[in-house]
Image (cartoon, helix red, strand yellow):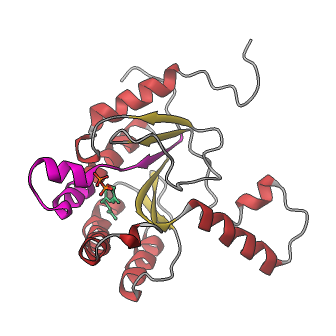
Amino acid sequence: MKEKNIPEHVAIIMDGNGRWAKKRFLPRTFGHNEGAKNLKRILTHAKKLGVKYLTVYAFSTENWKRSKDEVETLMSLFKTYIKKEEKTFQENDVKFIVSGRRENVSKDLLDSIDYLSEKTKFNKGITLNIAFNYGGRSEIVDAINKIIDSGEKNITEKTFEKYLYNDIPDPELLIRTSGEIRISNFLLWQIAYSEIYVTDKLWPDFREKEFEEAIESFNKRERRFGGINV
Ligand code: FPP
């Protein structure tokens, strides 16, 4: 691709797995499986283009309301993903981190998360941040409670950020697949100045070409951060 301005951090709401499966008369779980395969494609491609951080919304604090079956599928998919991708992450220099609450997540899954985070903590190629059991409001409330516990006073925007789940740069670009135009409690603090790109493509169909189109669209935006460009 010709574009020079590659965002350092891209965040994605990977929506539409269920609809992708429904269109094919398949159970929703098939859609999630395809979604996980697609995450691998997009992660590899993002790294190739020079993106340094990729944050993806894999399970929200609201997703517990789904059927027991679907919740279990998403939990076990994450566990399998961690197991399967360890080698690829090491070979491709991927640092794996997770943002979200630990409560209600099984010890087994937490152990896998901690294991892969530890194993990849010195990798520098790209950071994959999986938002899992994540809610933007919970993240802010959790940060406030950490600040109270720490006793730190005179909090500024900069010092506040240290208390978020992960202290990484804000995403310049937020992509949402499958056409819904809403934020769904994702990265509420971090997206204050992000460019938002919504596409009708369902997540399993959002491939390398579509990712590049999102970056091309980002390149055409004029980012003013509340100021005026002269
Ligand atoms: C939204 O689509 C997607 C999710 C709630 C789960 C996202 C999970 C993946 C892409 C799989 C990869 C995850 C891991 C942990 C490796 P939806 O089910 O709400 O779709 P719909 O709106 O069409 O029903």
| Residue 65 coordinates in the image, percent (x, y) | 38, 71
Residue 58 appears in which quarter of the rendering?
Answer: bottom left
**Which quarter of the frame holds ligand 1?**
bottom left
In percent of width and height, residue 192 lies at 65, 43
- Please state, as top left, top right, bottom left or bottom right, where the N terminus lies in the image: top left
Residue ID at (40%, 42%):
180
Quick check: 79 left or right of 223?
left
Q: Position of residue 213 (x, y in %)?
A: 36, 27
Left or right, 59 with respect to 22, comes to right
Say how many tags the image has. 0
> Is residue 20 found inside the magenta-colored segment of the image?
yes
Residue 164 in view (yes/no): no
Splitting the image into 4 quarters, where does residue 95 fall? bottom left
Look at the picture and state if 48 lies above or below 136. Answer: above
Q: Looking at the image, which residue is at 47% across and 74% down?
A: 118
Instruction: Depth check: give the residue in front, 212 or 138.
Output: 138
**Vertical position of residue 57 compared to residue 174: above or below:** below
Where is residue 194? Give x, y as percent. Answer: 58, 38
Is 183 included in the stretch rendered in magenta?
no
Image height of 200 relative to 64, above or below: above
The magenta region covers 8-37
Between 93 and 135, the one nearer to me in the picture: 135
Q: Kindly identify the residue that appears in the image at 35 percent across and 35 percent down.
A: 211
Q: Is residue 165 left or right of residue 73?
A: right
Residue 182 vs residue 141: left or right?
left
Looking at this rendering, what residue extends furthest in the bottom direction?
Answer: 107
Q: Residue furthest right?
A: 154
For residue 9, say whether it is visible: yes
